[in-house]
């Protein structure tokens, strides 16, 4: 099966790397950013082009959500399977007479960070059983966790991921702002962060909750609020209110 990966960002890079490491041939990586394409090509020994996508059986569109529709128009072949890797778009967003699908890896990707690909869940949606089998078998060569998913289910998977990853990372950024302002090395907080994440491998997150809000410690809550301002204060109040509501505290 001839595979072309479209894109030069984090997802494109990691999918290409996962394929190469698992000896899945990639015919070409195609995109607009020649500099990034050259880097990926050099590291993974995959031919690249920024002029036109090569003829293929499977095209994997790994670009930003806002670009998927326009990029899909570049594929003029009809007898092929095209999959985007978005968690929030329907497969029907793609324009073309080819067979449409979704190949969604549930992970946060950065080129500078190595990943254990076998642990990344993949969610597959296709138009027919044969394509479902094809993409499932492909994903199983990379990952131990592959699941069929409808668009309705995938929307909630992506929403959950935003809460569990993107929002949490933003809180890390806000926390580092506070520690930096007080000249406290943020590294000191890493064991706490690691233990917090590790704990939910063993305990339900709701049962693992600690802190002044779940204790309804009004003195500490007020003390913290007096130390904060602007967006960080708003976040602090909003999250504490959410915690109190979850635990039905006054």
Image: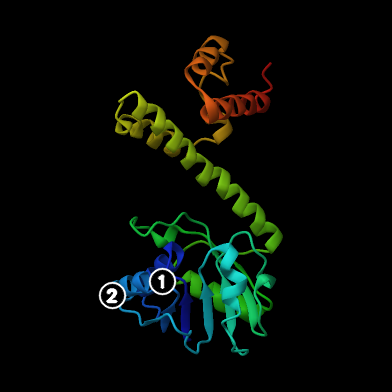
Residue found 40% across the figure and 32% down from its top? 177
Task: Give the mark nearer the N terminus: 2 vs 1.
Answer: 1
Which of the 4 image quadrants contains residue 18?
Answer: bottom left
Instruction: Answer yes or no: is residue 147 visible.
Output: no
Position of the C terminus by quadrant = top right
Secondary structure category for the residue under label 1 = loop
In this rendering, the answer to whether 99 lies above or below 10 is below
> What percent of the width, then of the height, locates residue 143?
46, 65
User: What label sits on residue 147 in the rendered view?
Assistant: none
How many numbered marks have been drawn onto this rendered protein structure?
Answer: 2
Residue found 45% across the figure and 74% down from its top? 32
Which residue is label 1 attached to?
A: 33
Which of the 4 image quadrants contains residue 150?
Answer: bottom right
In the picture, measured across the screen, residue 94 lies left or right of residue 27, that is: right
Depth check, front residue: 6 or 52: 52
In the picture, measured across the screen, residue 68 lies left or right of residue 169, that is: right
Residue found 53% across the figure and 41% down from its top? 167
Q: Is disc 2 surrounded by few (<14), some (14 to 19) or many (20+) residues within 10 Å?
A: few
Tell me the mark number nearer the camera, choosing from 2 and 1: 1
Secondary structure category for the residue under label 2 = helix
CA distance for labels 2 and 1: 14 Å
> What percent of the width, then of the height, locates residue 52?
48, 85
> What percent of the width, then of the height, locates residue 152?
71, 59
> What percent of the width, then of the height, locates residue 2?
47, 86
Which residue is label 2 attached to?
A: 42
Q: Is disc 1 surrounded by few (<14), some (14 to 19) or many (20+) residues within 10 Å?
A: few
């Amino acid at each position: 099966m001839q595979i072309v990966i479209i894109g030069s960002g984090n997802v494109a890079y990691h999918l290409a790397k996962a394929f190469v490491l698992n000896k899945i041939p990639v015919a070409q990586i195609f995109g607009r950013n020649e500099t990034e394409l050259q880097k990926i090509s050099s590291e993974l020994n995959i031919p690249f082009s920024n002029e036109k996508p090569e003829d293929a059986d499977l095209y994997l569109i790994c670009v930003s959500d806002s670009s998927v529709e326009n990029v899909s128009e570049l594929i003029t072949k009809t007898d092929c399977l095209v999959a985007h890797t978005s968690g929030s778009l329907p497969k029907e967003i793609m324009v073309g007479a080819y067979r449409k699908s979704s190949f969604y890896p549930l992970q946060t990707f950065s080129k500078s960070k190595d990943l254990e690909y076998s642990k990344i869940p993949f969610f597959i949606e296709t138009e027919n059983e044969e394509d479902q089998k094809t993409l499932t078998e492909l994903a199983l060569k990379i990952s131990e966790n592959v699941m069929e998913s409808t668009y309705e289910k995938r929307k909630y998977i992506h929403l959950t991921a935003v809460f569990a990853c993107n929002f949490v990372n933003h809180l890390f950024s806000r926390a580092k702002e506070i520690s930096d302002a007080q000249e406290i090395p943020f590294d000191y907080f890493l064991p706490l962060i690691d233990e917090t994440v590790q704990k939910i491998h063993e305990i339900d997150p709701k049962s693992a909750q600690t802190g002044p809000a779940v204790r309804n410690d009004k003195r500490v809550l007020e003390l913290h609020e007096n130390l904060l301002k602007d967006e960080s204060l708003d976040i602090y109040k909003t999250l504490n209110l959410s915690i109190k509501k979850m635990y039905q505290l006054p």
